[in-house]
Every structure is written in C-alpha cells, then in structure tokens.
C-alpha cells in the first residue's frame, strides 16, 4: 500500500517581496511540481529518499521517531536538519502521526530542476502537511516563515490572487487565461536565488503605502486585462516600482537592453526565472546569450 501526495510548483508574477507588506499578488501554479510517496518498510524508523527530475537520488537519510518528537540535535547536515524541523513542526500540530511509529519508506520526486526556484521547499512542506493531516500555512510559519503564497499555489488548480491583511492570508482563485499567452515566455537565468538572503536584504528597504497601493492596482490590471499592450505596459510599470524599492537596476537594463519586448523579474530578483513577452518567439535571442532554458507559457503554467 502506497500513499501519494502531490503539490504544484509556483511562479510569483506580481508583488515580489511586497507581499510581506500586505500587497496583493498574482501567483501561478506550474505544471511542474513534487510528489511524496509513503509506503511500509522493513527498516526501523523512516527511510527517506529524494529524487531529482532525472530520477537520481540527491538526498537520502534515516530518521528516528524520537528525533522527530524532540526536534533533533542540529549538526552540519543542513538538508537533514531542515527535514527534521519540518517533521517536528508537523508533530507539534498533530502528534498522532508518530504514535504508531510505523517503519516507513518515504520517497519524494521532483519533476523540475531543483535549481529553478519553483518551490522545492514549499512543495515538500505542503506534501508533508497533507500526509500528516496538518495545516501547511502554519507549518510554514513555525518552520521557515514567509508569506505563504507558495503554499497557496501548491494547492491551487489555477491562478490565485494572494494577500496578507492583519496577519491573515486570503487566497482567491481567478481565471487567468490571457489570449496572448503564446507571447509569454519564462527564461531561467542560470543561477538560483537564495530566498532567505533576499528577504533579509529586502527588510532593510523602505516601502511606502503608495508603493503597495500601486502594486495592488497593477496586480488587478495585469490579472484581468485583455490587451497585450496594456499587459506589457503594466509589467514595465511594476518593474520600475520594485526597482526603486529594492534599489536594484531592472534585469532588462542589466542584461537585455537590446531585447525587443518586455522583461520582468520574478520572485527574488537577480536569479531563478524572468518573464518575457514578445510577438515573435525569443528563444534564439536568449539562447544566443547563454540562457538555454526558455519555456513557453503553455508548457510552464497549470491551467
């Protein structure tokens, strides 16, 4: 008997780290995600294996129920410590899942490159929450923190508008199927962004209520417009606001000044994926500059 749980990856299209200040953001779940399979085992405790998108084991460990209950003793094994922290957080919410102390084999399988920044951690947290019958949003807050938009996307069947207000989050499912989606592409910048480091840097910046209000308005417009030109214009306005807040040059000015189209950073700025719009397929342009991973909208976004 094997139980399987699955969560979507995510892309944050608007808002970036202003979501932490209460800005409304547009998040899209991706076709790519991660599963977690739980089956009985003969080895004592929990045998854990994590497979990458090429079906190679990238992480493997053996866990005892005692360290899940206690939270373990941190050592120099960063990924293992992270896993124990998540499982301990689940235990604090629902101790029942460790009571029987069954011998288990747990395997996770990514279907995206874990350097892409599509949510290796958030999909894991949501899958563990599903398995242990706990609240994924609470589990995120008691372990690593963050806005929770990635958990909302992990659970979603389509686009979501996500917002935090007075400490409570809301997630609204919306229909986002722009007729110009064949002109939208996602390009990997060949470097993974450290979310925790970026959040620390962001917290030193000054964000005005005007900035938040403008992002709210642009999120509404970007998520509902029927006009390709307005979509591109709003993305560019959005990019300028975040550039000002972060005091960082836009990625187009940094790397792609000669690109004939709109380019918008996603997530933490400076790494992971960017969004590009163009009336003609821009794959050759980016690949000629060394960015080989260019994914059309229809091959990336879950609808």
Image (spheres, rainbow, N blue to C red):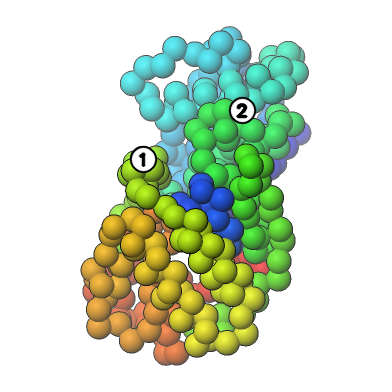
Examine the rendered structure and indicate whether residue 91 appears above or below residue 300.
above
The mark total stands at 2
Q: Quadrant of residue 284?
A: bottom left
Out of 149 and 155, give the one closest to the viewer: 149
| Residue density around tag 1, few if under 14, some if 14–19, many if 20 or more, within 10 Å | few
Q: Is residue 297 above or below residue 73?
A: below
Residue highlighted by disc 1: 200
Where the C terminus falls, by quadrant?
bottom right
Q: Which residue is mark 2?
A: 105
Q: Where residue 230 sits: x, y (%)?
A: 52, 84
The percent coordinates of residue 39 (x first, y second) are: 68, 31
CA distance for labels 2 and 1: 36 Å
Q: Which mark is residue 30?
A: none
Q: Quadrant of residue 176?
A: bottom right
Residue found at x 47% / y 81%: 232
Vertical placement of residue 108 versus 119, above or below? above
Q: Secondary structure at mark 1?
A: helix
Label 2: state its secondary structure: strand
């Amino acid at each position: 008997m094997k139980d399987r749980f699955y969560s979507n990856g995510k892309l944050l299209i608007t808002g970036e780290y202003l979501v932490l200040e209460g800005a409304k953001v547009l998040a899209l779940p991706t076709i790519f995600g991660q599963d977690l399979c739980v089956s009985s085992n003969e080895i004592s405790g929990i045998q854990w294996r994590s497979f990458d998108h090429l079906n190679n084991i990238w992480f493997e460990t053996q866990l005892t129920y005692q360290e899940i209950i206690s939270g373990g003793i941190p050592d120099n094994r960063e990924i293992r410590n992270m896993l124990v922290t998540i499982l301990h957080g689940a235990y604090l919410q629902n101790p029942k899942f460790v009571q029987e102390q069954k011998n288990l084999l747990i395997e996770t399988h990514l279907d995206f490159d874990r350097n892409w920044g599509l949510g290796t951690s958030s999909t894991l947290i949501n899958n563990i929450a599903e398995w242990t019958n706990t609240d994924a949003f609470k589990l995120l807050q008691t372990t690593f923190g963050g806005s929770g938009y990635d958990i909302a996307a992990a659970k979603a069947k389509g686009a979501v508008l996500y917002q935090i207000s007075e400490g409570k989050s809301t997630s609204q499912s919306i229909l986002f199927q722009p007729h110009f989606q064949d002109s939208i592409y996602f390009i990997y910048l060949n470097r993974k962004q450290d979310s925790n480091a970026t959040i620390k840097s962001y917290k030193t910046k000054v964000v005005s209520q005007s900035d938040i209000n403008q992002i709210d308005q642009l999120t509404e417009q970007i998520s509902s417009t029927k006009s390709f030109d307005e979509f591109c214009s709003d993305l560019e306005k959005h990019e300028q606001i975040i550039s000002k807040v972060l005091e960082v040059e836009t990625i187009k000015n940094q790397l792609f000044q000669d690109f004939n189209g709109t380019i918008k950073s996603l997530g933490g700025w400076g790494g992971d994926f960017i969004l590009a719009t163009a009336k003609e397929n821009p794959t050759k342009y980016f690949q000629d500059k060394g960015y080989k991973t260019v994914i059309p909208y229809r091959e990336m976004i879950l609808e």
